[in-house]
Amino acid sequence: MPQLPSGDCWRVVLARARRAVLFAGPRGASGGPGSVRDAPSGAGELRGELDRFGGVSVRLARLDAVHRLDPAAFQRALQAAVQKWRSEGRVAVWLHIPILQSRFIAPAASLGFCFHHAESDSSTLTLWLGEGPSRLPGYATHQVGVAGAVFDENTRKILVVQDRNKLKNMWKFPGGLSEPGEDIGDTAVREVFEETGIKSEFRSLLSIRQQHTHPGAFGKSDMYIICRLKPYSFTINFCQRECLRCEWVDLSDLVKTENTTPITSRIARLLLYGYREGFDKIDLTMEELPAVYTGLFYKIYHKELPDSYKTMTGMD
């Protein structure tokens, strides 16, 4: 059996999968596999969307008659469908349940379905039908925080804040959590503006911190990314709900102060090195490239590549 792709591959395929009617077709006269007994008229056979990895995705939100199904009838329909999919050699079932139809979770769990993830308005359960342990990809296990180190090369001033709701009022860079679908640089620019009122532009990625069992990430892993930003305004108008103080400070003073977090102190030293020796020594620049999926693009961050290497077609 071929290896199943994980993570994004599953989500992309499921998003592009052919739409199918979930409960359709006549009721089986024999009551055998694939038929639904005591289901509402027109409910018929429980069907789903097939993907090229051998899985089936069932979306209850697309079932017109779902509001007329009771949990017992749904369990019988799902059990019959699972038996059919297993006999067809399907490897997994993805069951998407809207929050207002959560009464169907318990019947699915009694058939062996487990939670995969939940969104604000729905939950997704899975059932592995293949041989051996499940090879389905897990859901996201990280949160992404982004901070902006706004540095003015002309004055050698850098923007720092003190959070209002911290036990220790230490200087740090403004930032927050990246929103779904938001680029890292856009998060840094947005968070800086929301917290300080300063407008800025993304210049480069400076560092990535990885921390596991993070209390602020519900015990999951945390990725904290710091970007170098160029300011386009200088008058501070900070958010008093989030910040206790906000100031432009000399970069050398930030390097020397003890009233800061370890990562802020390290990045201040990195910026001082870049300011003195050239930012090409520290910057990870960004470039957009086409993805393998038609019409999609991604951002890649790395040290600047000379133009001659970007265009070369072979090796000498």
Image (spheres, helix red, strand yellow):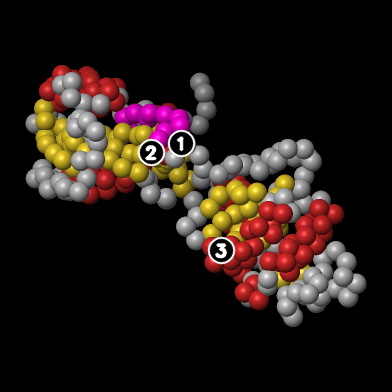
Left or right of 206 on screen, residue 164: left
Q: Residue 155, can we see it?
A: yes
Relative horizontal placement of residue 11, taking residue 280 as reference (left or right):
right
Which residue is depicted at the point 55% across and 44% down?
Answer: 139
Which amino acid does the dot numbered 1 rest on?
Answer: Gly
In the image, is residue 269 above or below residue 161?
A: above
Identity of the residue drawn at 25% across and 26% down: 261
Residue neighbourhood size for the residue with mark 2, other residues' Cα within 10 Å, grouped as few (<14), some (14–19), many (≥20): few
Q: Are marks 3 and 2 in contact (CB under 8 Å)?
A: no
Q: Where does residue 198 sit, x and y in percent of width and height?
A: 16, 45
| Image mark for residue 98 | 3
Q: Give the number of the disc on residue 206.
A: none
The residue carrying mark 1 is 219
Mark 3 is on which residue type? Pro
Tell whether 260 sits left or right of 286.
left
**Is 228 placed left or right of 178 in the picture?**
left
Between tags 1 and 3, which lies in front? 1
Q: Which amino acid is tagged 2?
A: Gly
Residue at image location 52% in from the left, 23% down from the top:
315
What whole-number distance in Å separates the C-alpha atoms at marks 1 and 2? 7 Å
Q: Position of residue 98 (x, y in %)?
A: 56, 63
Mark yes or no: residue 193 visible.
Answer: no
Query: Which range of residues does the magenta coloring cover?
Result: 201-215
Residue located beneath label 2 in the image: 216
Asked where in the image residue 303 lies, by quadrant, the reply is: top left
Q: Secondary structure at mark 1?
A: loop
